[in-house]
Image (tube, rainbow, N blue to C red):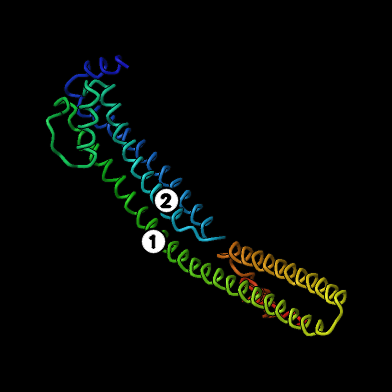
């Protein structure tokens, strides 16, 4: 690389302007192409992450993290552009100190325009070319950010709606489990009253036998309650996992093949027969 700076120093003064414009233009085009490719992949990354978050349980924190990482990746593209300019100017011998090269390129790239570092007078035309590269890439980034912010806002709105549905599903689950527990206790109380009435005047062995029958029925009631509770929890988990899933398409005869609205919620508990 020292050969490049030596070659640049031996160029006649009458050609330095043309060489500087050629060098700056080539670097500008390469950086803009790199920036465009990077924006394409960043937009694809954000779009794919949003599609994953739209299906299944809502995760608002992950959506915010996705937005933050997307903005950071866009910033990284500009940092890479500044570093690329500074490395090239340093290797060309136009700015010998690496830190001064980064400082100069950052000022020129952002069109800030102040600082004590400057290029060789014969090649200072590269400075506005650096500013042009910053204008191109910042304009491209601005357009990308508009799309990202709109997509992020739509995603957050969708996730908040799904979050409300998730809270309603969990509330329905709690009520269904409470109703099942209440029925189980009522069945136990009813069975206990019947056994108590039948035990009046019965011999000791008969009372013990009725008490044993009562314990067996109570055990059956509690097993039935646990099965119903597990069924309700399973249905609620499946409903949460199905949040955000688009409904099936409508069939040709006009009848929709989508399941009823209750298929994504908690089915009302069925009444168990009284004993």
- Against 146, is 19 above or below? above
| Image marks 1 and 2: residues in contact by CB distance under 8 Å | no
Which residue does the image show at 49% across and 52% down from the upper left?
Answer: 49
On the image, which quarter does residue 226 sit in? bottom right
On the rendered image, what quadrant is the N terminus found in? top left
On the rendered image, what quadrant is the C terminus found in? bottom right
Q: Picture coordinates of residue 253 (x, y %)?
A: 70, 80
Q: Picture coordinates of residue 53 (x, y %)?
A: 51, 57
Secondary structure at numbered mark 2: helix
**Closest to the observer: 240 or 47?**
240
Q: Picture coordinates of residue 142 (x, y %)?
A: 32, 52
Q: Marks 1/2: CA distance? A: 16 Å
Which residue does the image show at 29% across and 18% down from the upper left?
Answer: 4
Which residue does the image show at 60% across and 64% down from the upper left?
Answer: 242
Q: How many marks?
A: 2
**Closest to the observer: 241 or 73?**
241
Which residue does the image show at 30% across and 50% down from the upper left?
Answer: 139
Crowdedness near tag 1: few (<14), some (14–19) or many (≥20) residues, C-alpha within 10 Å: few
- Against 115, is 66 above or below? below
Left or right position of 251 against 194: left
Instruction: Say which residue label 1 marks.
Output: 150
Instruction: Say which residue label 2 marks.
Output: 65
Crowdedness near tag 2: few (<14), some (14–19) or many (≥20) residues, C-alpha within 10 Å: few
Q: Picture coordinates of residue 55 (x, y %)?
A: 56, 60
Left or right position of 192 against 267: right
On the image, which quarter does residue 266 sit in? bottom right
Left or right position of 266 against 66: right
Secondary structure at numbered mark 1: helix
- Viewer-nearest of labels 1 and 2? 2
């Amino acid at each position: 690389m020292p050969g490049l700076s030596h070659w640049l120093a031996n160029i006649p003064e009458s050609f330095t302007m043309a060489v500087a414009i050629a060098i700056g233009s080539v670097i500008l085009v390469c950086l803009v192409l790199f920036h465009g490719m990077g924006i394409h992949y960043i937009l694809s990354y954000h779009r794919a992450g949003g599609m994953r978050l739209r299906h299944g349980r809502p995760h608002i924190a992950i959506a915010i993290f996705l937005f933050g990482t997307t903005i950071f990746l866009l910033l990284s593209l500009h940092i890479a552009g500044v570093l690329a300019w500074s490395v090239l100017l340093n290797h060309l011998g136009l700015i010998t100190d690496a830190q001064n090269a980064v400082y100069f390129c950052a000022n020129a790239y952002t069109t800030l325009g102040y600082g004590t570092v400057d290029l060789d007078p014969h090649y200072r035309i590269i400075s506005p070319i650096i500013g042009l590269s910053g204008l191109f890439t910042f304009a491209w980034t601005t357009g990308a950010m508009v799309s990202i912010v709109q997509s992020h806002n739509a995603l957050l709105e969708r996730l908040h709606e799904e979050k409300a549905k998730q809270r309603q599903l969990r509330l329905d689950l709690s009520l269904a489990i409470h109703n099942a527990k209440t029925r189980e206790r009522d069945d136990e109380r009813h069975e206990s009253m019947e056994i108590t009435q039948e035990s009046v005047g019965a011999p000791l062995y008969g009372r013990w036998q009725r008490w044993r029958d009562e314990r067996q029925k109570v055990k059956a009631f509690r097993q039935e309650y646990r099965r119903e509770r597990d069924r309700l929890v399973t249905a609620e988990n499946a409903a949460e996992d199905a949040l955000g899933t688009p409904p099936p398409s409508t069939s040709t005869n006009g009848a929709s093949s989508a399941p009823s609205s209750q298929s994504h919620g908690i089915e009302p508990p069925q009444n168990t027969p009284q004993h």
